[in-house]
Image (cartoon, helix red, strand yellow):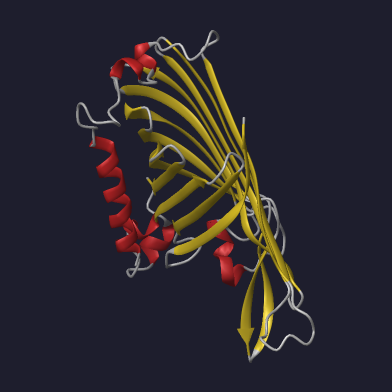
Amino acid sequence: MKFKFLSVVLLFTSVFAFAQEPAGSPDAVDPAASFTPSLAPKIDSNHWKKAFKLGLNMNQASFSSNWKGGGISSIAYMAFLNGTVDYAFEKVSFNNLLDLQFGAVNNRNSGFFKNVDKVYFDSKLGYAISKHWNLYVAVNFQTQFYEGYVIKTVNKNDTSLYISNFMSPGYLTESFGLEYKPVTWFYVRFGTGTMRQTFVTAKNIDLAETKNYGVDPGKTVRNEVAFMIQAGLDKDLTKNINFKARYMGFANYMIPKKVKENTNITFFDYIDHRLDLTLTAKITKYISTNVNATLLYDYDQDANVQIAQSLGLGVLITF
């Protein structure tokens, strides 16, 4: 399954890295208007561009005690905040992205459980060396807000296992290298020099279920030096439909000790992949629907690809 996932990732990168809009098409990008540092665009009088989106999605269902059709009363919600702050002047660019999401479901039988939980921050400083290429340094941070559990059935009994929390895991990545940005809505970064710290600060995480996220038991942090490839896409498909995609691939330069000790594991098993997809459609000025999906492969967590998906309808405020 992981090889299929890698193929999808490589296809995603190759298609959007080198695709150009045909001249004269409605979506063709005028190079003079492109938001690339080398063209010294004036976003506004201060060369800054800022945008924020705040949303709340809810779903509710209730049934009387004598409802013969069956069902469980429940309420679910998801709140999110997405913001970008960008600067561009002459050859210098400074791009910042914040993506916060949290959602939960509460039903009468099993109680409160989260179903969406994400903290994502990315900051990049770039310097243009040609029309579409930049030197860059960047910092990326990922974790979650709240504790997480998984339900396992043992001897026909459901057992709740404690598997995650804020900064458990948490990922801090520092990188420098080259960025390719052919159009305003797509980029690829090649992080030739990358360091990543994996944090597990919470106690009593279930080690059998999580493998402690690659951090040695008894320790709270793991350091890695690696090559990283990162790609991002943010495109309006129509006036009211937007598609976002983010990919991050991470390959440790040092062959992990587990590869040396186990002939059934290869170096390619230890290349981490994460792909986040978001499709947002505005129904009215303040009502929208969105679909989120995340595909994750990290051998330190699980030998198979992990998939999370959510669909929401609710209020969206843009400012």
> In the rendered image, which quarter contains the N terminus?
bottom left
**Residue 78 in sight:** yes
Residue 27 in the image, given as x and y percentages of width and height: 30, 31
Q: Is residue 241 left or right of residue 3?
A: right
Q: Nearer the viewer, residue 98 or 221?
A: 98
Q: Is residue 85 left or right of residue 61?
A: left
Report the label total. 0
**Residue 234 in sight:** no
Q: Residue at x 55, y 10 (%)?
A: 46
Q: Residue at x 30, y 62 (%)?
A: 4
Q: Is residue 177 left or right of residue 116?
A: left
Residue at the front extreme of this rendering: 284
> In the rendered image, which quarter contains the C terminus?
top right
Q: Residue at x 73, y 76 (%)?
A: 110
Placement of 227 over or under 262, stated as above or below: above
Q: Residue at x 66, y 86 (%)?
A: 69
Placement of 211 over or under 71, stated as above or below: above
Q: Quadrant of residue 133?
A: top left
Q: Nearer the viewer, residue 56 or 286?
A: 286
Residue 279 in the image, given as x and y percentages of width and height: 46, 48
Residue 197 in the image, given as x and y percentages of width and height: 55, 44
Residue at the bottom extreme of this rendering: 155
